[in-house]
Structure formats: C-alpha cells, structure tokens
Image: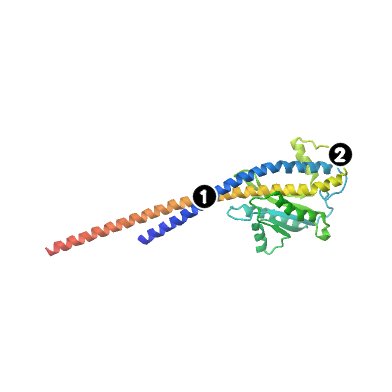
C-alpha cells in the first residue's frame, strides 16, 4: 500500500500544479475581457452611426454603387470568418466555424461560389486539415486587434468587391464572428456587409423610431459613397474583431474556471483516497506489530 500512497501523492502534486496554471489563466482572461469589453463599447456606436450614415447617403442617391447595388445574378460571395489564434476557450472557435459552415452551405445551395477569408489560426487549421482552399488568411492579433489590423483585413475584401466577377471579384461580402452579449453569453453571428440592404436598415430604424437625416452631396453622391466604402467595411470588421476578442477571453475565462473547479474536485477525491491508503498502511503496521508480539508471547510461553 506504500507504493499506492506515493502514486496518490504524485498525482495530487501534478493536479495542484495544473490548478495553479488554470487559475492564473482564468485571472489573466478576466482582466483581458474587461479591456476588450471597453473597446467594444467604444467602437460599436461609431460602427452603428457610420452604417446609418451610409444607408442615408445611399438611400438619397440615384447612382449605381457596389456598396448598395444588388447583382441581378450573384454567382460569387466572400465569407470572412473570424476565429482565434489559440485554444483553451471551450467551444468558441468550433461554434463560429460551424456557423460559417452553415452559411457556406446556404450560399452554395443558392448557386454561389464561396471564397473563404479567415482570421485566426484555428480557422486556418480547420480548412487546411480538410484541404479546402483559403483565399487569404491573417493571424497573430486576434487577442488584441487594432484598427490597423482591421484595415489589413479589409483591403483585399474591398478589392474583391470592386472587381468584376470574371476577374476574381465577388458579388457579396459576408462576415461570421462571435458577438459579445455578456460575460456568460457569446453568440456566433452571420452578417452580410455588402451590398448594404437599405430595406432592412430602414425597417430597423422605423422600429427604433429613427428618421433618416437628409444630406446634400458635394461633389456627388457617388464620390461620397466611394469615400465611405472603405471606412464602412473597416469599421464593421474592426468592431467584429473586437467583439470576437472579447468573446474569446470570456470563453477562456469560463473554460479555465471550469478546469480549476474540476482540479479542486479531483484533488479532494485523490486526498480521500490517499488518506484511506495511509490509514490502511497504519492498520496493517499495527496488525503486524500485534501479530509479532503475539507470536513472541506464544513462543515464550511454550519455552516455559
């Protein structure tokens, strides 16, 4: 039983070391999610108002523009998938990848060819393992994205939207990311960035009781839309990156807390087993001592 007790002690020591790591990671994730949440709160109003302004300009314009013009026969779509560079976040990446797969299946069912653009090494690994084509990918900044990162991602997507389909362009631009709702709730979201659906935006504003502002265009509405197109895409992608980062940190915090709690339960269970083994050792030693004493007493009595 002495060997068994050593095994339990070794396992308790190993689990205790793991518990310290998971506890530290939980605390780090908790501090990061607060910072990320502040960035989300700061960027969301800008992205919302910019979308509103773009919708107002496009609604008052009579020109055909890639920002708002629906193709008569859309045949190609770009899907930007935002995942994480790292794991240890529960089902965070797998859930958003599943949402992207559902969107891709729907677009393919509509007869559209899908170009995959991926942010995060987890998404890239998923596509690489299945030997699926990725048009472009980015990584290394998913934990703390900046506006410069958003511009880097938006550049190729804007070029694809402005190109003709025959030259490798796309008719639609979709984005799939995880929306940060609260510390306990993060939801995968599928959103179409381009072309901007003016009808849907108008319905949303009517529900909120908002009135679209009136604008005078100088020099022209087309020039205004040309200037707003990159800002709109960059702002929406930046907000999505921040939402995804906050969601990832919240998921990591939750996963590490669960791991820490499991480690505590395992330590308690192993401690009980170790105590039982120690008591068994003590009982066996006492039995051996008593047995040895009885044997000596019997031997002494027989010699007399």
Q: x, y (%) of residue 38?
A: 64, 42
Residue drawn at x 72%, y 49% is 237
Q: x, y (%) of residue 278?
A: 35, 55
Residue 123 visible (yes or no)? yes
The foreground one among 78 and 108 is 78
Above or below, 167 against 240 in this view is: below
Question: Label for residue 23?
Answer: 1
Q: x, y (%) of residue 144?
A: 65, 50
The foreground one among 32 and 178 is 32
Residue 1 visible (yes or no)? no
Task: Name the quadrant containing residue 106.
Answer: bottom right
Query: Position of 216 compared to 186: left or right?
Result: right
Mark 2 vs mark 1, CA separation in Å:
57 Å
Residue drawn at x 76%, y 54% is 155
Q: Quadrant of the C terminus?
A: bottom left
Q: x, y (%) of residue 181?
A: 64, 44
Query: Position of 53 compared to 62: left or right?
Result: left
Question: Is disc 2 surrounded by few (<14), some (14 to 19) or many (20+) residues within 10 Å?
Answer: few
Residue that lies at the very extreme toward the left in this rendered image: 304
SS under mark 2? loop
**Location of mark 2 (residue):** 216
């Amino acid at each position: 039983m002495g060997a068994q007790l050593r095994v339990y002690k070794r396992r308790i020591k190993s689990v205790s070391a793991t518990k310290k790591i998971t506890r530290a990671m939980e605390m780090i994730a908790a501090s990061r999610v607060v910072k990320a949440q502040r960035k989300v709160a700061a960027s969301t109003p800008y992205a919302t108002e910019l979308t509103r302004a773009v919708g107002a300009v496009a609604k008052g314009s009579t020109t055909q523009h890639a920002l708002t013009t629906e193709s008569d026969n859309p045949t190609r779509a770009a899907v930007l998938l935002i995942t994480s560079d790292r794991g240890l976040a529960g089902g965070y990446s797998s859930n958003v990848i599943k949402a992207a797969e559902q969107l891709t299946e729907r677009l393919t069912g509509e007869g559209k060819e899908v170009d995959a653009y991926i942010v995060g090494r987890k998404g890239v690994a998923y596509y690489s393992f299945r030997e699926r084509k990725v048009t472009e990918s980015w990584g290394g900044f998913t934990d703390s994205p900046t506006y410069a990162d958003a511009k880097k991602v938006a550049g190729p997507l804007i070029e694809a939207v402005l190109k003709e389909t025959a030259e490798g362009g796309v008719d639609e631009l979709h984005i799939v990311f995880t929306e940060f709702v609260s510390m306990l709730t993060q939801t995968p979201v599928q959103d179409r960035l381009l072309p901007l659906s003016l009808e849907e935006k108008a319905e949303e504003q009517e529900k909120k009781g908002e009135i679209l502002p009136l604008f005078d265009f100088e020099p022209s509405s087309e020039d205004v839309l040309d200037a707003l197109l990159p800002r709109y895409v960059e702002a929406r992608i930046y907000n999505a990156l921040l939402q995804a980062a906050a969601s990832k940190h919240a998921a990591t915090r939750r996963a590490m807390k669960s791991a820490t709690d499991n480690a505590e339960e395992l330590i308690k269970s192993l401690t009980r087993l170790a105590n039982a083994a120690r008591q068994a050792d003590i009982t066996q030693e006492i039995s051996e001592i008593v047995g040895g004493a009885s044997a000596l007493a019997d031997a002494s009595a027989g010699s007399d």
